[in-house]
Amino acid sequence: MAKTIDHVSLDTTPLFRAPTGKEHSIYLLWGDQVEVLGKTGDRVQVRARGRTTFGWVDEKALGGQPLLELYFIDVEQGDGILVKTPNGRHLMIDGGNRRGDQNTGKNAADFVDWKFFKDYAEDRIVLDAMIASHCDADHYGGLTDLLEVDKTNELDCEDVRVKALYHAGVGWWKGARGRTLGPYAKVGKEYFFTQLVGDRDEVVAALEPAANPALTGDWAEFMRAATGVRWTNNRPTAIRRLSSADGYLPGFEPGGDGEPEIKVLAPVHFEV
């Protein structure tokens, strides 16, 4: 059965311990999401801020609008951002290093797991878009840990679903002297990488044992994990290269019915 979701409309409101009286546990803030469980008099019973946090709020405190939420995750070295749109879609932009390379033994995958399992009381992580800005391990390592939920047993959520993975096209390839970013061309005074990987079929082909050229190292491991993930309709996760030529992130173009517009500024695309 679908959950009944509402949002706090006041700057702050107490989460009361009972349907009557003034004793409360915490304060909820404007825009906080709650799951409505029932109604007693002028108060509504809700679950808020956690799988086991229950209480009552005044009915007049609800009826608010959902907000755009951005979570900048402490991944030590690197980058990791979780975005929740007003319509409840989630985007993951980078994920820091892999769990084993973090001083805390935790990374962005653990934060996203906490958000869905503890805060939303969900057993499945659902991401409408996963974006790997580039092929440095401190930006995609945590994404690998998120996609390999069935291998690591580190997450509370039992499943991860991703609609689309977007990447910059530049990757690590097997070279005669180790890994390389691939060949490049000089045009005037500028140099351009020319060996780019694009959609899902190209990624799968570059991961074959006999592939030439072939992706290698942790980048290949990340891409291999991505090819094994599916969306909620059980279709394989779409994989595609994203650049400034696309203009906007697919599904987040102008006129998105209250959703944010997400413009792609880089990598900058040239025809050479």
Image (cartoon, rainbow, N blue to C red):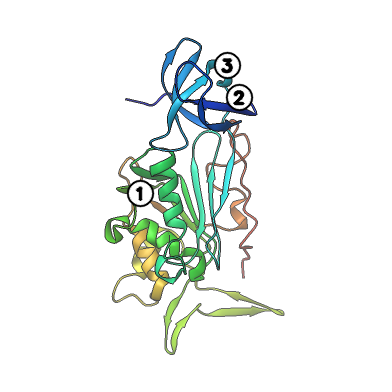
For the view shown, which residue lies furthest in the bottom direction?
Answer: 177
Secondary structure under tag 2 reads: loop
- What residue is shown at x 59% (from left), y 38% (from top)? 68
Please state if 259 lies on the left or on the right of 210 as rendered: right
Locate residue 222 relative to residue 27 in the image: left or right: left
* Residue 215 appears anywhere in the view: no
The amino acid type of the residue labelled 3 equals Lys
Residue under pointer 1: 160
The residue that disc 3 covers is 60
First in sequence: mark 3 or mark 2? 2
Q: Nearer the viewer, mark 1 or mark 2?
A: 2
C-alpha separation, residue under disc 3 versus residue under disc 1: 36 Å
Q: How would you rate the neighbour count of disc 2 (Cα within 10 Å): few for under 14, some for 14-19, many for 20 or more?
A: some
Q: In the figure, 169 relative to 186: above or below?
A: above
Label 3: how many residues lie within 10 Å, few (<14), some (14-19) or many (20+)?
Answer: some
Where is residue 136? Give x, y as percent: 51, 71
Q: Residue at x 30, y 61 (%)?
A: 152
Which of these two is toward me, 60 or 153? 60
Real-space Cα separation, disc 3 to disc 2, in angstroms: 8 Å
- Cβ atoms under marks 3 and 2 closer than 8 Å: yes
- Tag 1: amino acid: Val
Find numbered disc 1 in the image and state the secondary structure of the residue it sits on: strand
Query: Which residue corresponds to mark 2?
Result: 9
Q: Earlier in the sequence, mark 1 or mark 2?
A: 2
In the rendering, at what x and y percent does residue 9 appear? 60, 24
Residue 6 x, y percent position in the rendering: 50, 25
What separation in Å lies between label 1 and label 2 (alpha carbons)?
31 Å
Sooner in the amino-acid sequence: mark 3 or mark 1: 3
Name which residue type carries label 2: Ser
111 in relation to 75, above or below = above
Q: Residue at x 42, y 89 (%)?
A: 176
Label 3 element class: helix
